[in-house]
Amino acid sequence: MNEPIFHYYGNKAGVEGADQIKQVIDDATRGSEYYKRQQEKRQQVLQKVNKMQMELENYNKNEQKKKEIKEIIQNKVKEFQINTDRIWAHFDMDMFYVACELLDKPELKDKPVAVGQSIVSTANYVARKYGVRSAMPTFVAKKLCPDIIFIPCHFEKYKSVSNIFMTILKKYDDNLESMGLDEANLDLTQYINNSQEDPAILCENIRKDIFLATQLTASCGIGPNKMIAKLASEINKPNGMHVVQQTPTAVLNFLEKLPVRKIPGIGNITEQILTGLNFNTCKDVRDRADQLYIIFTPKTFEYIFYSCWGVARNYHVEFEDQHSISCQRTFSSISTQREFEDKIDYIADKLAEEMQSEEKVGNHLTLIIKTAKFEIRNKSLQLNQYTNQAKQISIYGKQLLKIMQLDEPIRLLGLKMSSLANEKQIQKQSISTYFKRQYEKSVGQENIASVKGSKSHQISEDNDSINKERLQQQELSKPDIISDDEASSISNQILSGVNSKSHQSQAQQQQYLQKQQAQPKSFRCPICNKEIDCKGNNTVLNKHIDRCITQQNVIVEQSDESNRNFSEQKKKVSSKIESKAQKSLNFFKK
DNA sequence: GGGAATTGATATC
DNA sequence: TTCCAGATATCAATTCCC
């Protein structure tokens, strides 16, 4: 049981005396709940490795199957080619957060410094010599290096330096892909083709430019694709550069002895599995790819296999919309229902704030908790409408809490909203729906679509008690913004958004709009209830409604005692930059 | 049986 | 002195539902 939980990388720049460091970390953490949980996980991984080992033993006895799989692998190797006709560069600012802080505090340059609060975000190379590294709890860092100086994060500062960094790089590839504030990948092919410059000289000059503009150093890697460039950038860190020549042989040689853990996407667990099965380097993977094929799922196999052969994406992908927005907080353990609910209120408010500032609504909510024993659990719920309102999020969150049946203390609670949509788009759709219904009423038709009839309205009339509870809760959730009056019902749809799946098809909308144009008439405003003579002009109507929505928003909040607290809290300025800074792109997604 | 939804695990910065 | 974050993504396994 004395086996270390984390594999420590003694080869990381600045680290010395890996054994002693391991010992200090071990002594500092042994016995904690966190440590116990890590041990459990470690055991699970070992069991998995054992199972895989047995699978491999069986495989090795089966000559027929071996022949079959080896043939598949040979074909795969024949099929692909290591494409070397593009030139990529990866730039990475050295110890970025700390470096930014040291600009303001140059007197700390030769002292051990780290940025972070409870966890180390970045440490300078002085601190790294003591074994301090990213993602390490600060109390461990202090044990390793009692003189270490901690500086809290100032994302605004990092963002402005990052802007300068990115601006310089964009001259060479306007579509560059940035991963966080301090890293970027550039496809230099076009620039090099035009300028005929030597890539290495060009990148040296870019590094100089970065230093002149920011007073900070960046490391760089050059290679034929994104992955190779990133891997190369780590070779001569800090303030260095490495070039992998644009030939398949150079790529294969570069990867030959590279530990599998270096491949982006292979983390702590996958490394444990791979090394447990004696796949230590990329060459091991290449040599025994048939065994890899047996033990991993197809997707995982393909990713590891191709990466070890140096085959990775060498073109830009289109930026995808964000899929989820979440908010979570760690605190000292709580265990009463009241405390859980208070936390949900708080987190729901933060999440709503974030969603509103991003102008997003969502209709899938997930409650995430971490027990005092560091176990993570979650439950999710498909909502019957889009929302970004704190009160509604909180009600759904509490519903999820009930479903989860928590019976132990927790140290973290979070809420995540997914199935996101653009708030304004959803509002527009609600307005269209409203007018369509008005029109249908006026011509004596039945409603074609209604909010409650939506496909994703998962609360059906069955006997499921949870669903019944949900339904009751949703009914409960309405009165704070919905009255019996249809006008305010519609205003609620507009304010909180309506499930887009419930809306009529584009064709139906088109048809409706055409009819509306053919038969211009006056409408009663859904919000102020005034008769509006639109004279067939939708702009007049829209303007009126926009005005009313804004006013109504204020009225609704002021009229509700409990909502008042929320609106007050909403006024607090949120630090948006922090969350932005953490957003990362999936680097090697094909 | 198969696709969709839910939950858990893993990774990254 | 205290004692291991937060946001986001993808993939895999499991469960649900038609």
Image (cartoon, coloured by chain):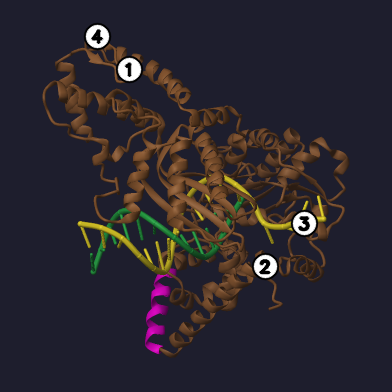
Chain colours: A brown, B green, C yellow
Q: Earlier in the sequence, mark 2 or mark 1?
A: 2
List x then y, in percent, for residue A193: 54, 41
Query: Which numbered tag is attached to residue A35?
Result: 2
Q: Chain of mark 1?
A: A
Q: Earlier in the sequence, mark 3 or mark 2?
A: 2
Residue A136 appears in the figure: yes
What crowding class fits label 3: few (fewer than 14 Cα within 10 Å), some (14-19), or many (20 or more)?
some
Q: Earlier in the sequence, mark 4 or mark 2?
A: 2
Task: Same chain for labels 3 and 1? Say yes or no.
Answer: yes
Amino acid identity at mark 2: Tyr
For label 1, the residue is A542
Q: Chain of mark 3?
A: A
Q: CA distance from mark 4 to mark 1?
A: 12 Å
For label 3, the residue is A139
Amino acid identity at mark 1: Asn
- What is the chief secondary structure element of the magenta stretch? helix
* Callout 4 touching callout 3 (CB < 8 Å): no
Tell me: A85 left or right of A373.
Answer: left
